[in-house]
Amino acid sequence: MIPTIEDVKAAARRIDGIVVRTPLLRCDSLDEAASARVFVKAECLQRGGAFKMRGATNAILGLAPDVRARGVIAFSSGNHAIAVSAAANLFGISATIVMPSDAPRIKLEITRANGANVVAYDRVRESREEIGARLSAETGASLIKPFDDPFVIAGQGTLGLEIGEEISPDVVLVPASGGGLVSGVALALPNAAIFAVEPEGHDDIARSLAAGSIQRNAPGIRSICDGLLSDTMGEIPFAIARARFAGAVVVSDASVRRAMKFAFRNLKIVLEPSGAASLAALLEGGLDIKGKTVALVASGGNVDADAFAAAIA
């Protein structure tokens, strides 16, 4: 099922009072750098430190009560893990999270602190999808996918609704991996030009849009943006992307580090590499946004202290 804007509005009602309505930040230096009116949606201030709480909460609340009681399973490099474990803890149900063994330490620690059982896997040699499906079949717990799920997409789209209630953006820049967040925002803001932002070496959305079919990234890790390293985008996000995306932008690790530093110095927020991707795209100056109203999503702030210190040094 491909969700609609009505599903996004329903999600907003469902998760009201659980997720945080995050602010739109402004700063003169950002407007000057972009020659545009720029608004930063600070999802790093969201419950759990990232936008993922929106989709996870909506998906769990969308389960029938007897099904929900059996618990949930998720696979994630970090922020979806944190969100599902936090929501499960909030609703008093069990959570098992399949996480890569090289996930940032802070994300592993928060997920475990939320009471979840963490199952580690090798993201290069093993399939998290296969592990998640097997655990779901063995336990009867519901699998909450990170992006290829209509309830998750609708939940993420509530971020876009909040943007649209405050401004009417011409352009929106959204960090993208599997495409759940950016496709949800596209549903919520039908009159804006939506751009997915991806790290170099993991540009499957750009290639998928160009090819007209879903493309896959080669195995391996080629970016510091640990939350944007999916092998491929989801089928539901791709269907939305073909109809709604204006394009996809690719950013380098160096530009992401500069964006993290800029956000810390000028916006006074801490961003993880994945969360800084949209800001990096704007600061690189490759988009025609002069004189426009631009919203960019700062999607998360769960970063290890050492990695953050190195980025802003």
Image (cartoon, rainbow, N blue to C red):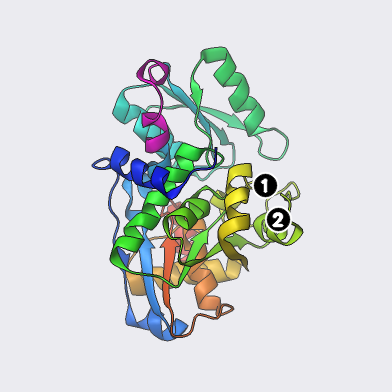
Instruction: From the image, state whether disc 1 or disc 2 is nearer to you.
Output: 2
Span shown in magenta:
57-69
Q: Which mark is residue 208?
A: 2
**Quadrant where the N terminus lies?**
top right
Residue 61 in magenta stretch: yes
Residue 121 in magenta stretch: no
* Residue farthest to the left, as pictured: 17
Label 1 neighbourhood size at 10 Å, few (<14), some (14-19), many (20+)?
Answer: many
Q: Which residue is mark 1?
A: 232
Q: Which mark is residue 13?
A: none
Please indicate whether residue 92 sits to the left or right of residue 245 in the image: left
Spot occupied by residue 135 in the image (x, y as percentages of width and height): 57, 20
Tag 2's secondary structure? helix
Please indicate whether residue 213 sits to the left or right of residue 104 in the image: right
Residue 114 seen in this snapshot: no
Residue 62: image quadrant is top left
Disc 1 and disc 2: Cα gap in Å? Answer: 9 Å
Residue 98: image quadrant is top right
Spot occupied by residue 266 in the image (x, y as percentages of width and height): 35, 75
Label 1–label 2 contact, CB within 8 A: yes
Q: Amino acid at mark 2?
A: Ser
Mark earlier in primary sequence (1, 2): 2
Spot occupied by residue 204 in the image (x, y as percentages of width and height): 69, 55
User: Image point 37% across, 28% down: which residue?
Assistant: 88
Residue 133 seen in this snapshot: yes
Tag 1's secondary structure? loop
